[in-house]
Image: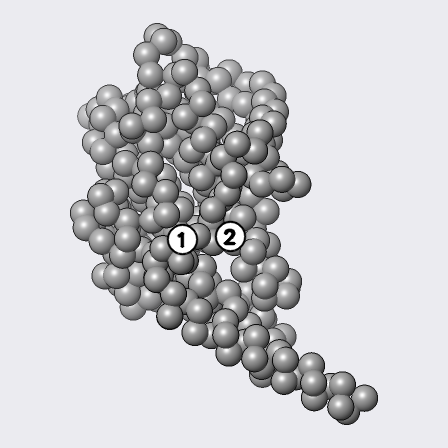
Amino acid sequence: MKIVHRFHLATLLIVLMVGAVYAQSSTFDQLAALYTYDKSTPLELEQKDVNVRNGIKIYWLSFTVTKGNRANGILVVPQGDNKRRPGIIWMHSGGPFFWFSDALLMAQAGAISLIVSPNFGSPDLPAAQYRDAMIGAVISIRRAIDILESRSDVDPGWIGYVGHSFGALMGAVAAAVDKRFKAAVFEVGLQGMSYHLRKSPVGWAAGHRNRLGSELESYLKVISPVDAINYVGHLSPTSLLFQSARLDPGVSEQDSLEFYNAASDPKQLKWYDATHEVTDIEAISDRARFLAKELKLSSIDPILRKKTGLN
């Protein structure tokens, strides 16, 4: 038993040593290859009518990401003329309904939205499986672009992205390896999941650190190739808005700044007196104005004034 145990331990150490240097030694093109997928794989799109709200149609979607793996989403489509419209893809760490109000807001300005809810995975999984789940989340974003591009009412030259937390990290990767995004918003993002698990004080991350114990660093090395910091410098020419929260208990100001500073231009950073769930009306308004400007939508200000009751 001791001999077998030592053999497995030695093998594990070799694998981890290889993984430890993979992200650092790999070129961007090699990292980008992790997210290659077969575009000819049928989307097998299932679409179900949910509701019509003030002339905006809402659908529940299910689609194939890769063979044997599917994702769900919410499609928000403004009604009216038959012109081609800008599209926006959204991903939120709390699930698709967290972006629902924002998608309805942008629909009033003329955008078609697809809110993606992939299988996020969890650090409860073995490291390689968690890494692969994150890779799948990135591919699900790319497949969402395919869905929008397949629609006759979407202009593929004007597609934006908005991601919160985990969605910001996966979106940074997706926008770096897939140049179809005109603009992107990253809300309360940081350098990557390995950084978050290593040092975030929130209970979720601390619990995983305690569970992993002495295996923590080896686990983080395996998932580090998917860290957003490896990709955020390759986002040009996509226009970027970073939205960070000064009272975020899990993403420090330093983490936010390092994520932003590593990014390519053009970019801008805005801060809010908010926690990790950024519900500040200023943040919502800034994001809406940025998307409207970058995606050539109708002016959002009259819509915001009507919603807030301000003249």
Looking at this rendering, what residue extends furthest in the top direction? 81
Q: Residues within 10 Å of mark 1 (few under 14, many from 20)?
A: some
Residue 190, can we see it?
A: no
Q: Which mark is residue 233?
A: none
Q: Which residue is mark 1?
A: 32
Residue 158, can we see it?
A: yes
> Which sits in the foreground, 271 or 239?
239
For the residue marked with disc 2, what is the amino acid?
Answer: Ile
Whether label 1 touches label 2, CB < 8 Å: no
Residue 1 appears left or right of 133? right
The part of the image, by quadrant, that contains residue 62 is top right
Residue 256 appears left or right of 143? left
What is the x, y in percent for residue 12? 62, 78
Q: What residue is drawn where x is 24% and y is 21%?
A: 298
Q: What residue is drawn where x is 58% and y is 60%?
A: 130
Q: What residue is drawn where x is 23% and y is 47%?
A: 236
Looking at this rendering, what residue extends furthest in the right direction? 1
What is the x, y in percent for residue 213? 59, 80
Looking at this rendering, what residue extends furthest in the bottom direction? 2
Q: Which residue is mark 2?
A: 135
Q: Residues within 10 Å of mark 2 (few under 14, many from 20)?
A: many
Q: What residue is drawn where x is 28% and y is 49%?
A: 235
What is the x, y in percent for residue 36? 47, 46
What is the x, y in percent for residue 238? 25, 42
> Which sits in the foreground, 84 or 2?
2
For the residue marked with disc 1, what is the amino acid?
Answer: Ala
177 over 52 or under it: above or below:
below
Q: Earlier in the sequence, mark 1 or mark 2?
A: 1
User: Which structural element holds mark 2?
Assistant: helix
Query: Foreground mark, 1 or 2?
Result: 1
Which quadrant of the rendered structure holds the C terminus? Answer: top left
Distance from disc 1 to disc 2, alpha carbons, whole Å, reads: 10 Å
